[in-house]
Amino acid sequence: MISLIPVVHYEEQSLSGDLRMGTESVQPIRIAKYVRPQQEWKEIIAVYLYLAGMGAGSFIIGILIHWMGAELNPLSIPFIELFGVRLDLAKFPILWGPIMVSIGAPFLILDLGIKWRFMYACLNPRTSWVARGFIILSIFIVFGLLILAKSLLPFKWLYPESGLWLIPEVIAFVFAFGTALYTGILLKATKSVPLWNTPLLPLLFLASALSTGSMSIILSTLATGLLSYNSGAMKALMYGEQIFLAIEGIVLYLFLSRRYRASEQGKDSVRLLVTGKLRYVFWQGIILLGFVFPFVLEWISKYYQNSALLFIAGLSLLTGGFFLRLGVLRAGIKDQIPMQRLMEIQYELIQNSKSLPTGR
Amino acid sequence: MDQKALVVDQQKCTGCRQCELVCSVYHTGASNPSRSRVRVVKWEQVGIYLPMTCNHCEKAFCVEVCPTKACHREPEKENRVVIDRNLCIGCRTCIIACPFGQPFFDAQERVTVKCDYCDGDPQCVAFCNVKALSFVDADRVQMAKKREAASKLADLLKQARG
């Protein structure tokens, strides 16, 4: 097999030098000009994917704690007064996920060309995954905020102890999974980007949502004193978070190795991410901040019983979660069109076209 | 109506980019190639120019991913794929989905735009001086190549006969 891309520093490739026509070491056209990651979805979409994933993940973990009836410490500030209404904050540190999703969703609208027309997408749910996403997110936000409001408001006519509240809780729980998965499905549905066109991407985003979600719940419960550092629930949460992180690491490895073998552009995307222009995002952002630091710091914090280190580990993991979305978004390279391959063969831009893996 | 197709002969194209200008003038009223629906792609390594425009694919990814049905097919008008600018929300999903990199985001109108065959009379074809672009019936797209192959075969047969 011919190695088509010896060094993947795309921005440093030039058309001069040995790329002149007719020389021996002619490089394929796509390296010089056409291997470009997509430029349409950038940081705004990454922020949306991150907040939606993290918010949904934290709600899943929070509602599980709520259902399991873990023993929660009374808060140092148990309530606040707002417009004469006493808001009960006892469950707020575990049920704030929908607020994050509500903050993230406007970023999707912010990225639109004509913002007020987002309603058009809501009105056509059967057309595409973008439209279905609006519906999934809306349902999750409505039911999630309803449950959060129920936990905050002290009104007796809400019957907070009623078993009927389980119905909206289950709906919100299911749609929280939907929201976490949807962030990956949105990218997968575009089809022409081989890096994204795999069921492993929704799975990766779900694993990341659960790891960042559980870590954010750990941070919020620790910071507010809802769970103490040595409590059983906190230990279970930390074990769970590390398991999610390990699963996320395995899925990330599978995702990258499968995409590397999937097609030429899948391979280019992985190279761009791992050794190319985005290598700092990958190694420092995703691997170091997202995996290595949290694992090491959590282990040290357990050893020394130091919760401050856990906070640093948490913030590092949450930042890593954002870089994961950003890296996957920015490394998306479109599939090669058949005409381009035809040109390469016609003008002998590749030395032996038969030896190239097709992968499709 | 029969399906028609815009055919490009890259051997004839000189890269003058007149097609881009007439396209933008026709659609936007401005002589601004960045708002054109056709883009001339340079392949400097081999020294060719290729006007790239929408292929109006049989199985169009842009139609599949559009969340508002702004991007749709019109079977009654040359079976073309068009974007309704009054419905487009500018999400750019179609741009990412198209493997040919075709729909373009118009930064002034804030919507995605694409080739609509100028309602049956493509201006790029009308104004192409070297006739690198042609608008033909879809079943006649390969006719020129078939003729070329047939003439080559005839030459070979003549040589074989001596």
Image (spheres, rainbow, N blue to C red):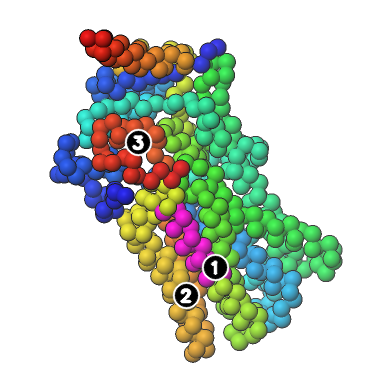
Q: Residue at x 81, y 67 (%)?
A: A160
Magenta residues (range): A244-260
Q: What residue type is labelled 1?
A: Ile
Mark 3 or mark 1, earlier in chain: 1
Q: Where does residue A246 sit, x and y in percent of width and height?
A: 52, 71
Q: Which amino acid does label 2 sit on?
A: Pro
Up-down relation of residue B131 to residue A247 (above or below): above
Mark 2, other Cα within 10 Å: few <14 / some 14–19 / many ≥20: many
For this view, does A360 lie left or right of residue A212? left
- Identify the residue under disc 2: A294
Q: Where does residue A358 sit, x and y in percent of width and height?
A: 41, 43
Secondary structure at badge 2 equals helix
Q: Which residue is drawn at 48% across and 60% down?
A: A254
Residue B84 in which image quadrant: top right
Tally of numbered tags: 3
Q: Where does residue A30 sit, x and y in percent of width and height?
A: 31, 41
- Identify the residue under disc 3: A341
Mark 3, other Cα within 10 Å: few <14 / some 14–19 / many ≥20: some
Up-down relation of residue A41 to residue B131 (above or below): below
Q: Residue at x 23, y 50 (%)?
A: A12
Q: Distance of mark 2 from mark 1, alpha carbons?
A: 14 Å
For this view, does A20 lie left or right of residue B131? left
CB under 8 Å between callouts 3 and 1?
A: no
In the image, A28 versus B118, the foreground residue is: A28
Mark 2 or mark 1, earlier in chain: 1
Q: Where does residue A249 sit, x and y in percent of width and height?
A: 49, 67
Q: Distance of mark 2 from mark 3, alpha carbons?
A: 44 Å
Secondary structure at badge 3 equals helix
- Identify the residue under disc 1: A247
Q: Which chain carries label 1?
A: A
Q: Which amino acid does label 3 sit on?
A: Arg
Mark 2 or mark 3, earlier in chain: 2
